[in-house]
Image (spheres, helix red, strand yellow):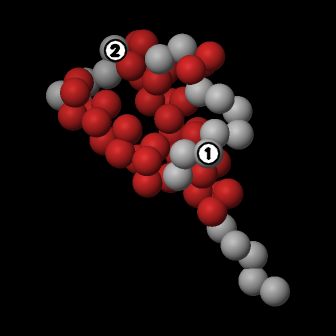
Amino acid sequence: MSPDFVTPGSVRSAAEVNEEIRALWQRTGGTLSAEERAEYELLVVEWAAALRGGVVKAA
């Protein structure tokens, strides 16, 4: 996955991104190449942003 693939301000939910992370680990058998590691890191950043975006502040 190239950095161009992830769109800033992605509207995917944390659950959707988490599913992609799980699929990546399953697809690779738990061992990531350098390229897969870069993809994983981008997904984790997107997942964390989705989590933050889903938090509703209490009044």
Circle 1 — which element?
A: loop
Q: Position of residue 12 (x, y in %)?
A: 55, 45
In the image, residue 15 above or below residue 54: above
Q: Position of residue 50 (x, y in %)?
A: 60, 51
Of mark 1 and mark 2, the one earlier in the sequence is 1
Q: What residue would you read off at disc 2?
A: 33
Any part of residue 42 in sight? yes
Residue pictured at 21% horizontal, 34% vertical: 26
Q: Position of residue 43 (x, y in %)?
A: 50, 35
Q: Give the label on residue 24, or none.
A: none
Q: Tell me the quarter of the image containing the C terminus.
A: bottom right
Any part of residue 48 in sight? no
Considering every residue shown, the one lying at the far left of the view is 29
Q: In the rendered view, does 42 fall on the left or right side of 15?
A: right
- Amino acid type at circle 1 is Val
In the image, residue 42 above or below residue 14: above
Q: Residues within 10 Å of mark 1 (few under 14, many from 20)?
A: few
**Closer to the camera: disc 1 or disc 2?**
1
- Amino acid type at circle 2 is Ser
Q: What residue would you read off at disc 1?
A: 11
Residue pictured at 62% horizontal, 45% vertical: 11
